[in-house]
Amino acid sequence: MIDERLINSDATDLKGLHQVMMEQPNSEKLCDIDMVDIAIGSGVAMKVSDAVKKLTVGKRVLMVSDPVVILDKEQRPVKERIKKVLEKNYQVEWLVIDEPDGSIVHCTPENAARIQEHLNNADCVVGVGSGTICDLCKYATYYADKDNSKPLIIIQTALSVNAFSDNASVMLISGVKRTVHSIYPKILLIDLDIVAAAPPEMNVSGYGDLIATWTAPVDWYLANVMGMNSGFHSAPSDMIRTQCKRLLENSEKLATGDEKVLADLANVLTLSGISMGLANESAPASGSEHVMSHLVDMASKIRKTGICYHGTQVAVSGIISSLLWDYLLKEFDPSKVDIASCYPDADGMKKKVFEAFDWLDEDHKAANECWSDYSKKLATWEANKDRLKAFLDNFDEFKSKVSGWVQDPAYIASSMHKAKAPCRYSKLNFPVDAKTARWAITNCHLMRNRFSVIDLLHYTGVWNEKFVEMIISRADALDAGL
Ligand SMILES: [Zn+2]
């Protein structure tokens, strides 16, 4: 049974949330959320000086943003207003991070270093923007001084991703997307007057990021059952599942910018970030659907296109992942698995990883990076042979445990259609061609050391080109996929 108090969790009640989490069975697996305050509401960004005051007696504020002009509901320039309000009490340096070629700002260690150059002259950092600025600020402040990081406030300008309330940053390192440990913003301000005016596709992106709720937690649980991950706890996902379901039910209202639904989205997105913090890893909200999306991002440089809205792309991949889970739970036949052939040798897998990734660059960096992580997964898989047998023997038990954690793929796709979220890779803001999408789906399990349903299907001999095509055609029948 789910603890009733989890069902309607409120992201702004950090104390209450902590209390409920500490009362869960096995609560020692859940981490503390090292945040001071989360505020969601109309006008909360204008109280930024009070937020700084809570964190430091110092008078120097480093404000970080990208160059994008952001207007609020009343068409007022957001960043200029925040700077002005801060200047009443503080000495403010405004650092604008941009890319030399004018493209959308990337989350790279190089851009983080540009922030770090200014930290010595700051008592507090205020990041204003969407996911990239947030991840850069978290990474920059943490790695500048891990033991004594400059306090960070984030003013979130769109409900684009769930990453504002966690202690990790998704960085582009050597061309490969990596989730790295960083630090929580001490205070998160989500001003509904600002996020309501964000481009609708950005808020749809946040809704899309939450589609992972129907695949990532089950991937995480599966990894746990297989001995591939030991940190699983059900509470982080129990905390958001019911509210995510309500969002799906309100998909049509989201498309019209309904303010109540946007406020609900703000709450559940923030909780989703917190779910990763509780687990101290992104697994509760990032499974097979995210890794597919990461591969599409990795190919964008070679394809010379921009990077799509994260959550929107995750949701398109989420439909594919939900079809995989649907297959596993309804059609996978454990009696047909030949256990002896479930353990490929390392040389063969290394070859596969290099075939998948070596075209991404000339110095083999991407393929080496992927293999260094994948080889760990392969070794753990080998070391837990007894788990596979137990899983196959008790498959019905597994199915009944997770049946309430997944969602019918057709329902997910139809909800996304109602929310006006793209359901096909070719309909994303930077359309992804069929070849790239097929490559990403087929090879995503080779990229990192995180076990998902795809690894199980791969090791048990189900995963091959023909199978991927079958899943793609099932997606097509839902007006989704390529
Ligand atoms: Zn995400």
Image: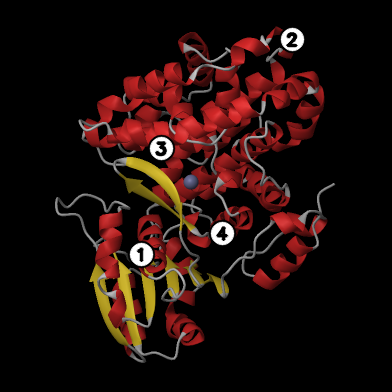
Which disc is residue 140 wearing?
1
Residue type marked 4 = Thr
- Element under label 1? helix
- Element under label 3? helix
Relative to 230, 78 lies left or right: left
**Cα distance between the residues tagged 2 and 1:** 51 Å
- Whole-percent x, y for residue 131 in the image: 40, 56
Residue at 39% from the left image edge and 24% from the top image edge = 353
Residue identified by numbered label 4: 270
Q: Nearer the viewer, mark 4 or mark 2?
A: 2
Write down the quadrant of residue 310 in the picture.
top left
* Upstream in sequence: badge 3 or badge 4: 4
Residue identified by numbered label 3: 294
* Upstream in sequence: badge 1 or badge 3: 1
**Cα distance between the residues tagged 3 and 4:** 21 Å
* Upstream in sequence: badge 2 or badge 3: 3
**Cα distance between the residues tagged 1 and 3:** 22 Å
- Element under label 4? helix
* Upstream in sequence: badge 4 or badge 1: 1
* Upstream in sequence: badge 4 or badge 2: 4
